[in-house]
Image (cartoon, rainbow, N blue to C red):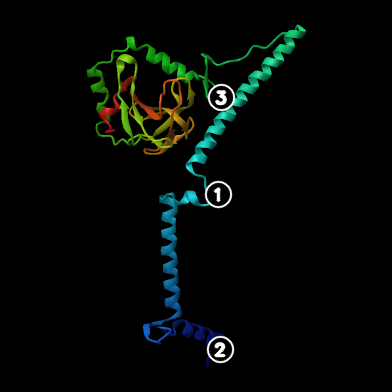
Amino acid sequence: MFSPKKKKKKDFINKLSSSYRVTILKETSFEEKFSGNLTPIKTLFISTLVFLVLSLFFWFLYAHTAIKYYIPGYPNEEIITADIQNKLSADSIAQISAQNELYFKNLKALLKGDKIEELSYEKDSSMSQEGDLIFTISGVDSLARNQIEQENELDITESSLSESKKFLEEVLLYKPLEGVLSDGIDFKIGHYGVDISAGEGTRVKAILNGTVVFSGFTATGGNEIHIQHDYNLISIYKHNSAVLKSAGDKIISGESVAIVGNSGEHSDGTHLHFEMWQKGTPLNPEDYFSF
């Protein structure tokens, strides 16, 4: 004799394994369209499988298509770009506000005959206007400019360039931007990179794994980002509408680091100015990429 608990358990197992016939009939003629046997266990298995397949399908749509931008609450690229621009604007406004506050403080002190405080600027603190905002040229920009201005001291020859680019012959590089080459490298006029035209809002990619060593606004290059890679290689991306990474960030090859724009005094249209330097020697990006 089975105990009540064992009997209930056995009845439950029997119900799960019981076979049921499922028939689909046409409503008007009662013609049989489908007929088959199902058990509760088989029904549960099929339902779980369908749920997993649908979950993977919707995950793929969300992760790899633009449909995610239509989901309420998910920011699109325009919102992300605007947010970055707003942060840059807020930083600049805060700097200007602090300078104005010190100015009025010194004005009051001057009228009273008290000692005034000097305005503190970074070295080479020339100001450049971007739209309605004023940005300070960074020390990094000044050092880079001084290095380029010493071109007469550099012996840039075809042989030195040939030696410099050998280290990249077997390295897989990621193209920084899909666009049209509008201007090439020209050492005689100090143009140490190439200009690539592309649609506004196009993402700029890192060519290789590396670390961001500079990210910010400069007078001539606009919003630019510099990345230090292995093999003593530095890649530079200028004139962006916004930069997506900060100094110190680790970057992987092909990762978005900026958005194409038209910032900086030396920009006359929406494009990317891209440079490659190795051991102080500029490389020609056209030797490594087909634009």
User: Where residue 166 sits in the image (x, y, percent)?
Assistant: 24, 27
Mark number for residue 3?
Answer: 2
Task: Tell me the amino acid under the disc marked 3.
Answer: Asp
The label nearer to you, 1 versus 3, is 3
Residue projecting furthest to the bottom: 1
Residue projecting furthest to the front: 28
- Residue annotated with mark 3: 132
Corner quadrant of residue 149: top left
Residue at 37 percent across and 39 percent down: it is: 254
Mark 1 neighbour class, 10 Å CA radius: few under 14, some 14 to 19, many 20 or more: few
Q: Looking at the picture, does residue 204 appear above or below residue 75?
A: above
Q: Nearer the viewer, residue 118 or 239?
A: 239
Q: Nearer the viewer, residue 214 or 60?
A: 60
Mark 3 neighbour class, 10 Å CA radius: few under 14, some 14 to 19, many 20 or more: few
Element assignment for label 1: loop
Mark toward the start of the polypeptide (1 vs 2): 2
